[in-house]
Amino acid sequence: MKKTPIDQQLVERNIAKLRIENVGQASIREIVALVNLIEEEGSEKFVRMEMGVPGLPPAQVGTDAEIEALKSGVASRYPMMDGIKPLKYEASRFVKSFMNVDVNPAGCIPTVGSMQGTYAALLVASNLDPKKDTALFIDPGFPVQKQQMLVMGHKYETFDVFNYRGQKLREKLESFLSKGNINSIIYSNPNNPSWICFTEEELQIIGELANKYDVIVMEDLAYFAMDFRKDLYTPGQAPFQATVARYTDNFVLFVSSSKIFSYAGQRCGMMIISDALFNRDYDNLKTRFDSNTFGNTVVLRVLYTLSSGTSHSAQYALAAMFKAASDGQFNFVQQIKEYGEKAKIMKEIFQKHGFYIVYEKDGEELVGDGFYFTIGYPGMTGEQLLANLLYYGVSAITLKNTGSEKEGLRACVSHVYRNQFEDLDKRLEQFAADFPVN
């Protein structure tokens, strides 16, 4: 048995303790639990790349506003189901300032993180038309959204977009939409995990097909304005965050405070529903939910039964962060560029030791540096690579977990600290020596 930075028996003992049958197929939370146990029992710390959580301090403007809200006594009062007025107004203004999209404040709904928003939207979309019982995920993507579909017992289909960029995307999407059973299209942009970003051409294709086949596009903007190849922070001026909302009225956008404002712990995000969709009547909603419009069903039927509102004080925090950003007083993009800078360095370290970037191209150009990147190693599947790297104190998740058809791992940079780069370099050097590429 080779001597590795992490004792192999320690790793295997804790895999057995958690009853993980195949560590290469383990979920994000299982990997988190496994590494926690190994670190608690052993003396070495991992280079942790498995969990997509923020690694920067929360935005001070939000913290200050929430403290003031709590001092004013909001904790004793339920918020309105559709959100406090200052947040709805500032969310609408933020979308206009950084996306150049007009949305009425009525359609700006706070949710307990974007995850609650996607759950509610997917649930309602699956009940709009009895014939349209299937959602379509453009993968790779956030694995938990498919878990949401599993929990709801609803159908979905997926495809890996890597080989269908540009005009190829139209034909691929039509091969699904033409069946008549698709109710929604879901994707993230920038993409988790590949970090590719859809072009305006591709977003126009998605929007046009959404109009043609009357399906809802759900655009997950968890990494809003984090395509650092462009400077996306100048309120009211181009370039703007790319969005399908310029090409269809059949959209729901999810804007998270977790990554862009490092405000993940307070679980407050926004669901942005287009004016046309928010006010649209569906006969089946009356039958299924005793409701009528898409917006009323989301807010007064689904969100109400899920949580009876979103944290009152956190709504004031998010309103303050949106306002400061739109006023030009809070350059949130500048603060989070640290992720891109770390990704660039980490990619170089991995590539120096024989690893390669799996999703290397974003259309015709190199993929940007951001919150995630993807790695592979010659001669190993993603499952084998993950299992082997654990002995070297490096954790990640497999691309298979994200719906990718490619072999490799998703690496998140947020909780890898600069003082760990030297250690990462040494561990990968030993890994490459122990697993030489022929």
Image: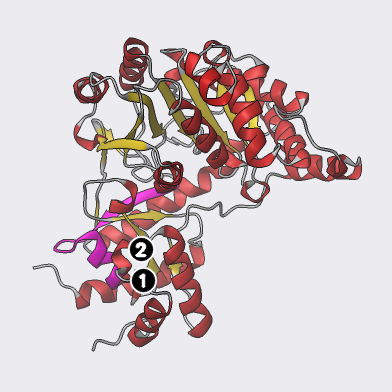
Residue depicted at x 60% and y 41%: 113
Residue depicted at x 15% and y 72%: 436
Q: Is residue 55 above or below residue 26?
A: above
Q: Position of residue 71 (x, y in %)?
A: 90, 44
- Near-viewer residue (292 or 363): 292
Crowd rating for badge 2 (residues with CA inside 10 Å; few <14, some 14–19, many 20+): some
Residue 3 visible in the current orientation = yes
Q: Is residue 269 above or below residue 37?
A: above
Which region of the structure is painted magenta?
371-388
Q: Secondary structure at mark 1?
A: loop
Q: Which mark identifies residue 26?
A: 2
Quadrant placement of the C terminus: bottom left
Residue depicted at x 48% and y 75%: 45
Quadrant placement of the N terminus: bottom left
Q: Which image quadrant for residue 303?
A: top right
The answer to which of marks 2 and 1 sits earlier in the sequence is 1
- Near-viewer residue (100 or 293): 293
Q: Position of residue 420 (x, y in %)?
A: 47, 68
Q: Distance from label 2 to label 1 (Cα)?
A: 7 Å
Q: Position of residue 40 (x, y in %)?
A: 53, 80
Q: Which image quadrant for residue 145?
A: top left
Q: Is residue 128 above or below residue 66?
A: above
Q: Secondary structure at mark 2?
A: loop
Magenta region includes residue 376: yes
Task: Check if mark 2's residue and mark 1's residue have beta carbons within 8 Å.
Answer: yes
- 9 left or right of 111? left
Q: Is residue 370 above or below residue 304?
A: below
- Near-viewer residue (253 or 408): 253
Q: Amino acid at mark 1?
A: Ile
Q: Which residue is mark 1?
A: 20
Q: Amino acid at mark 2?
A: Ala
- 71 left or right of 38? right
